[in-house]
Image (cartoon, helix red, strand yellow):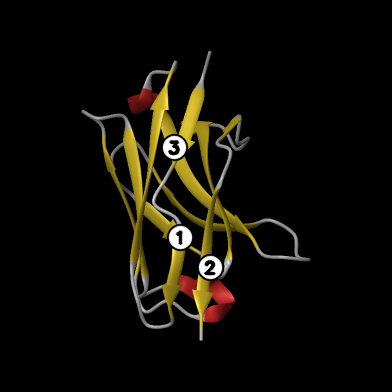
Amino acid sequence: QVQLVESGGGLVQAGGSLRLPCTASGLTFIRYNMGWFRQAPGKEREFVARISPSGGTDYVGSVKGRFTISRDNAKNTVYLQINSLKPEDTAIYYCAASLYGTTAWSYWGQGTQVTVSS
């Protein structure tokens, strides 16, 4: 079955950086857009970034310039590099997969917690 496994979360001070990897199994990775979402306490889950199989990227406006999504198709892994962390970035970060050419995010990881202290 399909599995997406995130890691790399933790407690970090404001201004710090984290790199979140998500490794996929059970799917043909090169056929999928990969995305990152986050859910802060008391808020709805929101889109953060996505990357197409060929490397095209898209970001929510609030993270442009601080977050970078990338992928290594040989390792079936997508990364989210988060720089200049702010307390408002505190959330559970989820990895997701969407078959290229479709809009539905079909598969989700279990999430990794990122906590930013001020």
Task: Give how far across and how far down residue 90 sits, in percent.
Answer: 57, 69
Task: Give how far across and how far down residue 93 sits, in percent.
Answer: 54, 53
**Amino acid under disc 2:** Thr
Farthest residue, direction bottom: 118
The Cα–Cα distance between marks 2 and 3, rounded to whole angstroms, is: 26 Å
Quadrant of the rendered image containing residue 19: bottom left
Q: Which residue is mark 3?
A: 33
Nearer the viewer's eye, disc 3 or disc 1? 1
* Vertical relation: 92 (above or below) 102: below
**Amino acid under disc 3:** Asn
Check contact, mark 3 vs mark 1: CB within 8 A: no
Q: Could you tell me which secondary element the residue under label 2 belongs to?
A: strand
Dot 3: few (<14), some (14–19), or many (≥20) neighbours within 10 Å? Answer: many
Farthest residue, direction left: 74
Q: Could you tell me which secondary element the residue under label 1 belongs to?
A: strand
Q: Which residue is mark 2?
A: 115
